[in-house]
Image (spheres, rainbow, N blue to C red):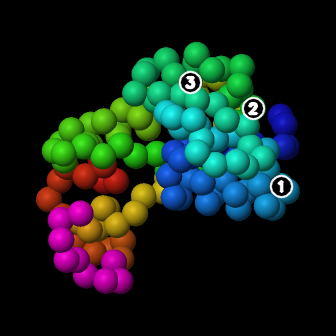
Amino acid sequence: MNNKKVALVVGGNGIIGRNLAAHLVSTNEWEVIVTSQKKLDYNLKVRFVQMDLLQQSAVTDKAAELENITHVFYAGYIERKAMAEQTETNLGLLRNLVTGLEQVAKDFKHITFIQGGKAYGAHLGIYKTPALETDRRHFPPNFFYS
């Protein structure tokens, strides 16, 4: 088993993804791979693997580039108009990623799932702040809870 930490940052063009990638690079403790559906719109010392996680075979198609992944920082998200469609789409992204990595990444250890205020209903209007994990959930569907 390899002891090298190899991070895959999913959603690399987003605010969370790009800042997380920069932080991981700054620690000099990680090999950092960033993925996004579109090419990165910034320069950072990372390896970029372009993937469309809407495609079920996205990860296995890039197996050689992803086989050493040990940790995933998941900040991917696609906005949709209807909550049900948004939840279904985003669950598909996550499912395709994890299912694929289970097949190709022999040292895959951990995934950190990063989501924001929508878990607390921020997209629905005013909500209690600070929001806590123990707060009541809003009516589904919601990607975070699904």
Disc 2 marks a residue whose amino acid type is Asn
Q: In the rendered picture of this protein, how many numbered marks are placed on residues?
A: 3
Q: CA distance from mark 3 to mark 2?
A: 12 Å
Looking at the rendering, which quadrant does residue 59 occupy?
A: top right
At label 2, counting other C-alpha atoms closer than 10 Å, the crowd grade (few under 14, some 14-19, many 20 or more) is many
Q: Which mark is residue 29?
A: 1
The quarter of the picture where the N terminus appears is top right
Q: Is residue 66 above or below residue 138?
A: above
Q: Look at mark 2 in the image and give the residue it sits on.
A: 68
Residue in the image at 57% along x and 35% along y = 39
At label 3, counting other C-alpha atoms closer than 10 Å, the crowd grade (few under 14, some 14-19, many 20 or more) is many
Residue 119 location, x and y as percent?
31, 62
Q: Is residue 52 above or below residue 47?
A: above
Looking at the rendering, which quadrant does residue 2 occupy?
A: top right
Residue in the image at 68% along x and 28% along y = 66
**Is label 1 in a helix, a strand or a loop?**
loop
Disc 1 marks a residue whose amino acid type is Glu
Membership of 130 in magenta stretch:
yes
Q: Nearer the viewer, residue 105 or 15?
A: 15
- What span is colored magenta in the figure? 123-131
In the image, taking residue 80 as reference, residue 60 lies left or right, namely right
Q: Look at mark 3 in the image and give the residue it sits on.
A: 59
Of pointers 3 and 2, the one earlier in the residue sequence:
3
Of pointers 1 and 2, the one earlier in the residue sequence:
1
The majority secondary structure of the magenta stretch comes to loop
Q: CA distance from mark 1 to mark 3?
A: 24 Å
**Is label 2 in a helix, a strand or a loop?**
loop
Q: Mark 3 and mark 1 in contact (Cβ < 8 Å)?
A: no
In the image, taking residue 53 as reference, residue 7 lies left or right, namely right
Disc 3 marks a residue whose amino acid type is Val
